[in-house]
Image (cartoon, rainbow, N blue to C red):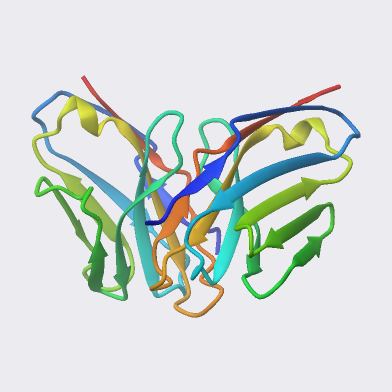
Amino acid sequence: DTGVSQDPRHKITKRGQNVTFRCDPISEHNRLYWYRQTLGQGPEFLTYFQNEAQLEKSRLLSDRFSAERPKGSFSTLEIQRTEQGDSAMYLCASSLGDPPYEQYFGPGTRLTVT
Amino acid sequence: GEDVEQSLFLSVREGDSSVINCTYTDSSSTYLYWYKQEPGAGLQLLTYIFSNMDMKQDQRLTVLLNKKDKHLSLRIADTQTGDSAIYFCAEINQAGTALIFGKGTTLSVSS
């Protein structure tokens, strides 16, 4: 297994457009997480899945954001009606569900909203 | 609430030791982690420590935990230019799900 992968690596979109990102976790990991990182900040938690169930959502995840993990494998994060404030690096991570809960991150998708 | 604080910059010479410090607020955190991020890349998990431990050593890395003061440090021995990166301290929330990160410490290593 080569680790967590994300696609695309970069996305430039115009304000008001919808975008969708994909994450493929490490195959034996049942937990999958989405984080957002802006310049000069650490990653901030958005949401997490245990298998296909979305069990936790941050208050940062506005109504314009939706995440899915339909078969408990890959996940998608969609942002509708993008705003300039959505410009950030979107990071995906995966882990086993047992301590020490080591989360392994993908390379991220850098979103630029113009 | 949960919060993690780190100093923003550290500059060292190649071959010296680097010590990156972090303070956290959630005393119920069971695990604390150190991640490394190189420019334009994702985060690489370096090491973690269980909250009942005082110290953990892993090759050139030594993690020290002072639970009373809620202080965590990462020591890198024999620092190399390839160690130049941003280092993030993180604690895990009580549910064992979300990581709470500091703003990161930029380590600059000069030869």
The residue furthest top is A114
Q: Residue at x 77, y 65 (%)?
A: B55
In the displayed structure, does residue B74 sit left or right of residue A53?
A: right
Identify whether A24 is placed above or below B110. below
Q: Residue at x 58, y 50 (%)?
A: B23
Tell me if A41 is positioned left or right of B33 in this view: left
Quarter placement of the N terminus of chain B: bottom left
Q: Position of residue A52 (x, y in %)?
A: 25, 74
Figure quadrant of residue B78: top right
Relative to residue A100, is residue B90 depicted above or below? Answer: above
**Image spot of residue A80 (x, y percent):** 10, 41
Q: In percent of the image, x 53 and y 43: which residue is there? A: B5
Q: Nearer the viewer, residue B51 or A65?
A: B51
| Residue B106 in the image, given as x and y percentages of width and height | 62, 31
Q: Taking B59 as reference, is B74 left or right?
A: left
Q: Quadrant of the C terminus of chain B?
A: top right
Outermost residue on the front side: it is B68
Which is more toward the observer, A51 or B35? B35
At a point 26% along the width and 66% down the height, the residue shown is A56
Residue A29, image x and y in percent? 45, 72
Name of the residue lying farthest toward the bottom: A98
Question: Quick check: A61 left or right of A46?
Answer: left
Q: Is residue A51 above or below residue B15?
A: below
